[in-house]
Image: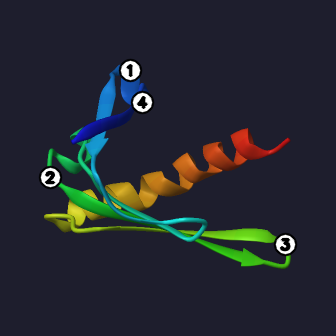
Amino acid sequence: MCRFFRNGIEGGRHPHYGRFLKVEKDRLVELTWVTTATNGFETIVTVELMPNDRGTKFSLTHAGFPNEELRKRREDAWPLVLAQLDQRMRP
């Protein structure tokens, strides 16, 4: 496993670990995701990239949660994370 990054949400440092399961150039990245937000459980994040007439459509799926509470917390958090990514990617 390797550490991808860590964030400083909620005043703490939260490392994110995982391993790449599948990488298809310009199309797909699938990786395991382990962090305090998943209570140490290994979950699966799949990112798909699909070209379209306005650029590239980005689809993210996060699966494999051990319970509904953890799934719901990530469902609520991902839009915030992706909005920050979108903001940083704009010229």
- Within-10-Å neighbours for mark 4: few <14, some 14–19, many 20+: few
Whole-angstrom CA distance, mark 1 to mark 3, is 37 Å
Question: Residue 47, how many percent across, how many down?
Answer: 48, 65
Q: Earlier in the sequence, mark 2 or mark 4?
A: 4
Name the residue beneath numbered marker 2: 41
Identity of the residue drawn at 27% across and 50% down = 19
Q: Which quadrant: the C terminus?
A: top right
Residue type at the position of mark 4: Ile
Question: Residue 52, how many percent across, how many down?
Answer: 77, 79
The residue lying toward the viewer, choosing from 33 and 36, is: 33
Whole-angstrom CA distance, mark 4 to mark 1, is 6 Å
Q: Earlier in the sequence, mark 1 or mark 2?
A: 1
Q: Quick check: marks 4 and 1 in contact, CB under 8 Å?
A: yes
Identity of the residue drawn at 53% across and 47% down = 81
Residue 33, which numbered label?
none
Q: What colour scheme has been applied to the protein in the rendered image?
A: rainbow
- Within-10-Å neighbours for mark 3: few <14, some 14–19, many 20+: few
Q: Secondary structure at mark 1?
A: helix
Q: Secondary structure at mark 2?
A: loop
Question: Residue 1, how many percent across, how many down?
Answer: 21, 42
Question: Residue 45, how many percent across, how many down?
Answer: 36, 62
Q: Earlier in the sequence, mark 2 or mark 3?
A: 2
Identity of the residue drawn at 38% across and 28% down = 10
Residue type at the position of mark 2: Phe
Name the residue beneath numbered marker 3: 54
Residue 9, which numbered label?
4
The residue lying toward the viewer, choosing from 37 and 20, is: 20
